[in-house]
Amino acid sequence: MTAPFLTVVDLRLIEQQLNKILKAKLTSNDQKIVAAVRELAITELRERLTHVDEDIIKEVETIEDTIGAELFFQSLKSYTIPFKSISEQGLQKLFKKDKKLKLPKLETIDWQAISYLSWLDKGTNRQYIVLEKEGEYTALRGVVDAHNPIKGVCSICNQHSVVHLFTATVKGNGDNYTSYSNYICNDSQLCNQRVSDYDKLQEFVARNLI
Ligand SMILES: [Zn+2]
């Protein structure tokens, strides 16, 4: 069996491009428009998924409806690299300084559906974000203004969304601290469904590392 080669981010990108094609088919009677949308979507997939087998991209071209799309995504499951699950102890190690760290309900997480792990401690207004790559975890923590969500563009998924301000304080040289604020999706589950560019996610994390 082939080793899994699709990240959750890759899946989201395929899903987004496929949805563009299906939407065009539903809303336009002009076959030329549908063909043009299809071509743009497929070109984008080819450019961004250079590590993905051409057969998969060709299959996207043949999908005609949501049922077809559903079956296709089912078939991709065995090729998907999940977020490597982490234990409560593992999380505690990542956030050593938080003595009373509030943990997320790990048993409810679908590791095949997330590109990053995030949870909020409503008591302290702290939001925790964890990224995983090849078994290595990167952690960051910020203070959020979750009670005042506004409409804006999320710095993680780069889409228009309901967002809140996430402020991370980063230690610089010596005793200097700098705070960075970014708007991110108020709903991290929804955000995870939209992250289709891993570089943007990594850039966000790099800017806010503790
Ligand atoms: Zn987002």
Image (cartoon, grey):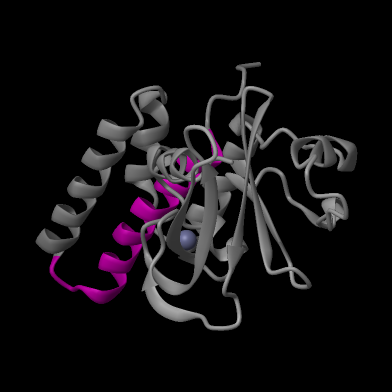
* Count of labels in the image: 0
Q: Is residue 120 magenta?
A: no
Q: Is residue 185 above or below residue 7?
A: below
The residue sitting at the front extreme is 175
Residue 114 seen in the current view: no
Q: Could you tell whether 182 is left or right of 8 in the image? A: left
- Residue 190 visible in the picture: yes
Residue 3, image x, y percentages: 62, 18
Task: Measuring from the top left, give residue 179's x and y in whole percent.
Answer: 47, 54
Give whichever of 117, 147 is nearer the camera: 147
* In-image side of 93 versus 18 (left or right): right
Q: Tell me what residue is drawn at x 31 percent, y 34 percent.
A: 48
Residue nearer the viewer, 104 or 18 = 104
Residue 205 x, y percent position in the rendering = 50, 42
Q: Nearer the viewer, residue 107 or 200?
A: 200
Tell me if residue 184 comes above or below residue 168 in the rendering: below
Q: Quadrant of the N terminus?
A: top right
Instruction: Decide whether the magenta segment is chiefly helix, strand or loop.
Output: helix
Q: Nearer the viewer, residue 77 or 186?
A: 186
Is residue 22 inside the magenta stretch? yes
Q: Which residues are magenta?
A: 7-30
Residue that sits furthest to the left in the current view: 32
Left-right relation of 15 to 168: left
- Which residue shows up at 78% across the image and 72% down it? 123
Q: Residue at x 66, y 36 (%)?
A: 82
Where residue 87 appears, x then y in whole percent? 86, 38
Q: In the picture, residue 100 is in which quadrant? A: bottom right
Q: Quadrant of the C terminus?
A: top right
